[in-house]
């Protein structure tokens, strides 16, 4: 580094200029740079890749645990076991949402069964006409009948 003496006793240090190593010359997300010193003492740009997004649940948008945050190109080369969790909806939905779905499906099935049972009951009632009920006997008549049966024995 060179030092220059400026008027009024101010000094300025000249910095080594760095040049892009790629053709893209704009400061974009895909052209981020990091300054690194080589073993030979030169300063060069390194291009760290974009960071991958963490997989999220399709229902509640919470982060999915156990899955790596990688770029889509890397996902293509990864095996299936690294991209999912060993569970139904693994790698797509979180455990809470899967549980909700299972409970909802179970309750819907239960509801269907109840509806079917009610329909069957109603159809049976329509098919069988109700018999006219016999007038109930008074308590005195019932007691007399019981006494008669006791006398016979």
Image (cartoon, rainbow, N blue to C red):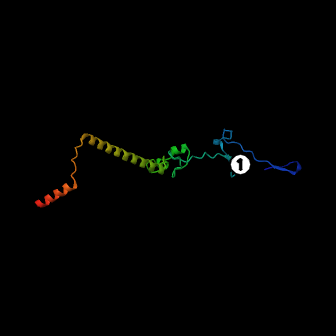
Q: Residue at x 17, y 57 (%)?
A: 144
Q: Nearer the viewer, residue 122 or 22?
A: 122
Q: Residue at x 89, y 50 (%)?
A: 8
Q: Position of residue 89 (x, y in %)?
A: 45, 47
Q: Position of residue 122 (x, y in %)?
A: 30, 42
Residue found at the far right of this picture: 8
Vertical placement of residue 131 versus 143, above or below: above
Q: Position of residue 53 (x, y in %)?
A: 57, 46
How many marks do you count on the picture?
Answer: 1
Vertical placement of residue 103 versus 24, above or below: below
The residue that mark 1 highlights is 43
Q: Residue at x 54, y 45 (%)?
A: 74
SS class of the residue under badge 1? strand
Pointer 1 local density, CA inside 10 Å: few below 14, some 14–19, many at least 20: some
Q: Position of residue 120 (x, y in %)?
A: 29, 43
Q: Quadrant of the C terminus?
A: bottom left
The answer to whether 135 appears left or right of 148 in the picture is right
The answer to whether 116 appears left or right of 45 in the picture is left
Q: Residue at x 25, y 40 (%)?
A: 127
Residue found at the far front of this picture: 140
Residue found at the far left of this picture: 152
| Quarter where residue 119 is shown | top left
Q: Nearer the viewer, residue 69 or 57?
A: 57
């Amino acid at each position: 580094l060179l030092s220059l003496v400026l008027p009024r006793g101010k000094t300025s240090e000249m910095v080594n200029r760095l040049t892009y190593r790629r053709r893209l010359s704009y400061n974009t997300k895909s052209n981020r740079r990091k300054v690194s010193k080589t073993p030979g003492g030169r300063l060069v740009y390194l291009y760290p890749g974009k960071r991958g997004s963490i997989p999220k649940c399709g229902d509640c948008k919470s982060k999915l645990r156990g899955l790596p945050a990688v770029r889509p190109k890397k996902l293509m080369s990864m095996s299936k076991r690294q991209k999912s969790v060993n569970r139904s909806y693994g790698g797509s939905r979180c455990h809470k949402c899967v549980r909700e779905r299972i409970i909802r499906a179970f309750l819907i099935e239960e509801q269907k069964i109840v509806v079917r049972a009610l329909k069957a009951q109603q159809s049976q009632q329509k098919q069988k006409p109700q018999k006219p009920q016999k007038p109930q006997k008074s308590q005195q008549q019932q007691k007399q009948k019981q006494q008669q049966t006791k006398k016979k024995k």
